[in-house]
Image (spheres, rainbow, N blue to C red):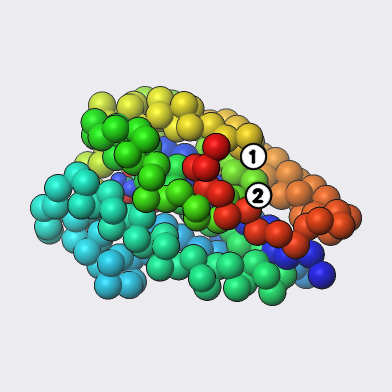
Amino acid sequence: MARGRFILLEGCDRAGKSTQCAMLVAALKEKGYAVELCKFPERTTTIGQMINAYLTNAKELDDQAIHLLFSANRWEAMQAMKNKLREGVHLVVDRYAYSGVAFSAAKGLDLTWCKNPDRGLVRPDLTFFLDLPTSEAEKRGGFGEERYEKRELQEKVRHLFHELKGKEWVMVDARSSVQAMHETILKTALDKIQEAQNEAQSGELLEDMFIE
Ligand code: DGP
């Protein structure tokens, strides 16, 4: 049996990731695939609650400390994610280590330092980057409630995402309609899943995130 595929959706705030994740999970389920949704930050764990307090401005933390907490929040989910993938369950993941690096580096932390804590996490098989100009993002309900929802920071984050672009990335224009984006994402995800089912060597997990 082929292992499950790790399908990541990344992008700037307001690009529509959560909507697209939900639509992708529902469509894959309807086609009979075993699929689960993961979201980072996962705010329900003890570490996740500290992250939530920081994002909602209830708690102050040094940039380095919050960076390590975001990374720890991914590591604490890793064993369960690996088990699911090995059981043949596909994972649709809403944000991951690319967000981790882009947001902290946008605040001025060194890029290599930012990548290090996430080195060795499982690498996604396919990453959709939902790209949205910051001026468009601002029109969608406006920024302001959470810590990072500021135009200047979002511009830097977007720029850094483009710099981090990995070989498994597929760029999606987030100005398109919800349905058009869904169709593109679903088709590409199905191709990846079907390609994996035909490969002899599809059992190995890629445990080399940020390892060149
Ligand atoms: P979300 O729940 O997807 O809306 O994300 C909350 C905010 O946290 C959003 O502004 C992006 C930011 N974020 C997500 N992951 C990370 C991370 O790993 N590190 C940092 N510094 N910020 C992150």
Residue at 79% across / 48% down in the picture?
A: 191
> Which structural element holds mark 2?
loop
Q: Is residue 28 above or below residue 167?
A: below
The residue beneath circle 1 is: 168
Per the rendering, the mark at residue 108 is none
- Residue 105 visible? The answer is yes
Lateral position of residue 152 relative to residue 37, left or right: left
- Report the residue that reaches farthest toward the front: 212
The residue beneath circle 2 is: 125
Residue 164 rendering spot, x and y as whole percentages: 48, 32
Mark 1 in CB contact with mark 2 (< 8 angstroms): yes
Q: Earlier in the sequence, mark 1 or mark 2?
A: 2
Toward the viewer: 178 or 6?
6
Instruction: Please state which amino acid type lies under the numbered disc 1.
Output: Glu
- Residue 103 visible? The answer is no
> Which structural element holds mark 1?
loop
Q: Is residue 79 above or below residue 191?
A: below
Toward the viewer: 16 or 87?
87
| Distance of label 1 from label 2 (alpha carbons) | 6 Å
Residue 143 rendering spot, x and y as whole percentages: 27, 39
Q: Is residue 165 above or below residue 23?
A: above
Q: Give the quadrant of the N terminus.
A: bottom right
Residue 172 rendering spot, x and y as whole percentages: 60, 34
The quarter of the displayed image where residue 23 is located: bottom right
Toward the viewer: 67 or 18?
67
Mark 2 Cα-neighbour bin, 10 Å: few <14, some 14–19, many ≥20? some
